[in-house]
Each structure stands twice: as structure tokens, then as C-alpha cells.
Image (cartoon, rainbow, N blue to C red):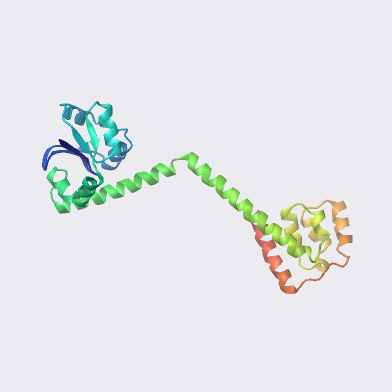
Amino acid sequence: MYSTILTELGIAVFDDEKCLKSFPFKNPAEEYVLVKKGESKLSEIGKFLANDQVTIVNDHGLLDILKKKSIDAQLMDSDQMDSIQSTKTNLLINSGLANDENDAMEKLREFAIQLSSSKVTEVSQSPDLHLIQAINTLDETDKIINSLSSRLREWYGLHFPELDNLIDSINGYSQIVLSGKRENISKEDFEKAGFSKDKVEMLCLIKEKVGEEIFRKKLYHSGIFSQTNFESF
């Protein structure tokens, strides 16, 4: 029974502990990923194993590829796979995929760098992923703004309760709160908030009414929330 082993540097076929043939990757990171996905052709390996010999493999993707070529392949058990991982350096040397231990370690390091780089490139080139991230960010930001706005209306509403029924815009409400106490709000403040002439006149009349006073500290905190909301637009 043969052992067909996928490594980071190529594929090696063993008969017991003797390496019969190795197939080095020209582009290790790219070809390794293709095998893992079961998308590589592996024509040379298919021809080499086409002799009715049973082979065991250490990877599901490699197993799928060989089975498509009508090769009698089976998956190794977990102990065999663990053994391959623990003796990876020696395996690379014995298969001729590396010259010595230092060469094996250096090639594995280069492979890791190439693999990381290719994954970053793949992610950055995915427009769908960028779109999903953007939508999720907007949704989360919208929830935060709505939560802050609700709290702001509750706090400032204790001081100027009439305002809540007249202003629906979060932006407009926040700009009014930035003016501080209701008696300090000027006609210009209402106009800067973007209200129509009729609404400005109505707000100017309403602000003269006596609302419930709140502590200066609470009003200060309302101003902070208002500034946060206003800067979010």
C-alpha cells in the first residue's frame, strides 16, 4: 500500500518509508490551496498511481482528486496524520523536496509568507465582501445613533418636553440641545437647525414656557450626547 502525502512544498508517494516519487510545486502556496480545495488536476500523479495499487492519503481534497481519476484511495487515520505533522521536516528531506533541515525550515517559512499574502489579496479583491462589511458597519452605526438619540430625547425632554413632538429630525434636535438651556436658545439657533419660518416662530413661543428644570450636570451630559449625534452625520 502506497502513502500519497500532501505537503506544503509538493506531493510525495511512499512505499512504506521509501519515497517512490515526489512532485514538487512550482508555486507552493497557490498549488497547495488548489489541492486542498480538490480543484487541482494532478495529471502526473494520476498517471503514476494508475497501477491498481491502493494508496492512503492525508488530505480530503487530495482524496477527492484521486477518486475522480478512479484511483483506489483511502483517507489516513488521525494517528497517521499526526505522525506526518510531527516528522514534517524529515519527510520533506526524504522525499527530495528539501535538501536538509535548514532548507526545509526556510522553504516552509517562505510558504507561510506566500500563503498569508495570497489570502490577503483574495480578500481585498472580493467586492462582495467589501459591500457586506460596509452594509454591516452602516447598520451598526445606525443602531448606535438611534440609541443615543433616544437617550438624548429622554434627558433633554425633562427640560424641554414640548420639543420632542415638534422635531422628528435627529440632526435638528441635536443642534437645538447644543444651545443648552431652553431660555438660551435663540431664533438664529432654530434657523441654523434648518426649520421653516413658521416652525421657528412656533418654537420661539414654546421655549418661553416653563419646563421642568434639570440639574446642570444632566444638561451637560445631554450636550455631550448631542455633540456625538451631530458629528455622526
Instruction: Answer above or below: position of 211 versus 118.
Output: below
Q: Quadrant of residue 18?
A: top left
| Side of 53 where 68 appears, left or right | right
Q: Nearer the viewer, residue 113 or 53?
A: 53
Report whether residue 98 is seen: no
Residue 98 percent across, percent down from the top left: 16, 46
Identify the image quadrant of residue 176. bottom right
Q: Is residue 138 visible?
A: yes
Q: Is residue 201 above or below residue 221?
A: above
* Residue visible at 21% across and 29% down in the picture: 46
Q: Position of residue 200 (x, y in %)?
A: 85, 56
In this orientation, which residue lies closer to the viewer: 195 or 55?
55
Determine the residue positioned at 80% across, 53% down.
195
Q: Nearer the viewer, residue 133 or 65?
A: 65
Residue farthest to the left, as pictured: 18
Q: Residue at x 67, y 54 (%)?
A: 146
In which quadrant of the rendered image does the N terminus lie? top left
Front-most of residues 51 and 30: 51
In this rendering, is residue 29 above or below 224?
A: above
Q: x%, y% of residue 111?
A: 27, 47
Instruction: Report how many numbered discs are placed on residues in the image.
Output: 0
Vertical placement of residue 81 versus 230, above or below: above
Q: Would residue 19 appear left or right of 124 to someone viewing this image?
A: left
| Residue 74: quarter of image | top left
Image spot of residue 40 (x, y percent): 29, 32
